[in-house]
Amino acid sequence: MLLEEEYRLSEYVDLGRLNENEKVHIVRNKVNGVIGVRKYVAPDLKEIYLFLKKNPNPYIPEIYECIQTETNLIVIEEYLSGKNLEEMLREKFFSEREAAEAIICLCRALHPLHNAKMPVICRDLKTENVIITNEGKVKLIDFDIARIYQPGKSKDTVMMGTEGYAAPEQFGFGQTDARTDIYAMGVLLNYMLMRCFPLERITEGRLKPVVLKCINLNPKDRYQNVDELETAVSSAVSASYNMENVSIHKPPFYKIPGFQSGKLWKMIVSVLGYAFVTYFFWSLELSGSKGQPLAAKELTLERFVLWLSQIVFIFFVCDYMGIRRNIPVVNSKKRIIRLIGYVAAEFIFIFAAAVICVTLEAILF
């Protein structure tokens, strides 16, 4: 490793493992404060990650560093706060439009890769590798089994892929190419709509013909490129997708925590919770610094500020509109770390409320 590369790596402070994976850590750049993900991948992926670094893509995490060591390739990439499709599908089915929007984003993610001078084939498109960020953006992650297409080869040197999503050619029946990723997107599209693989059950909606064409066993009978697939999906749902960066699953601002999923029991629990917080703080008996009863106006002000601080705290914990997405402590996969972060945040909100009360009282009264 060159001295310059060692220096670049030294600029990042380790903040701990991500998803309990010892090879993947959250890091923070000491110079600009940017949060990233550092991971160790196979050295033969260097060309692919260098391509991603040199060709930024709004549907793929930005690559900050790509450094070769004697045994590994160290990659530092953009940290994404959000949920993967598998997590989202545990909560609800996707509508045809939502599923179509996700597939269109993935088509746009893959277009520059498939059309590169040395085409890059992902080979691992699945729900766990598609993130919907807190801003509602679709991001394709994990190119750890990707390969560069090599014209003239009869099949891949190493057979890799995830069962259920992998096309036949990933198991030695031919060389993988762009149509291999298209097969996986057909499986993914069906899974978003049905929460099962096509072999188990095929969707019966408008997107059924698209799924069937994608998963054809013969690559020649599939869509031949992602542009064809994007056009077919758009036509199937009769929608126009001219936006530069499609955004899905970003709840509108008026859907406050507890009302975003549309589930009745969650809304009932939320109403009861908001009612309790409101009753508790608006019935508080507060006194002044010397223990004297507060005047009615001062009491109302302090009750309101304290109540508001707790509503904001609830919104913060529930990540309303992504307000905590850039704070790694409260996004940690470890419950104890998240709990510590939430407790610290509660103290901060209470302290801020006290400061605001004192300031407003000094100004108004």
Image (cartoon, grey):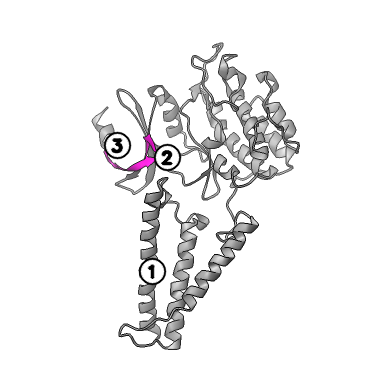
Find out whether residue 14 is within the magenta segment: yes
Instruction: Indicate which disc residue 350 carries.
Output: 1
Task: Report the magenta stretch's main SS.
Answer: strand
Q: CA distance from mark 3 to mark 2?
A: 22 Å
Tell me the crowding category of disc 2: few under 14, some 14 to 19, or many 20 or more residues within 10 angstroms, Cα based. few
Residue type (three-letter) at the residue carrying disc 1: Ile
Residue indicated by mark 3: 9
Q: Earlier in the sequence, mark 3 or mark 2?
A: 3
Q: Earlier in the sequence, mark 3 or mark 1?
A: 3
What span is colored magenta in the figure?
A: 8-26
Q: Answer with the quarter of the image where residue 344 lies.
A: bottom left
**138 to the left or right of 186:** left
Give coordinates of residue 207: x percent, y percent: 72, 36
Find out whether residue 43 is within the magenta segment: no
Residue type (three-letter) at the residue carrying disc 3: Leu
Image quarter where the N terminus lies is top left
Q: Residue at x 60, y 47 (%)?
A: 91
Q: Residue at x 67, y 18 (%)?
A: 218
Residue indicated by mark 2: 19
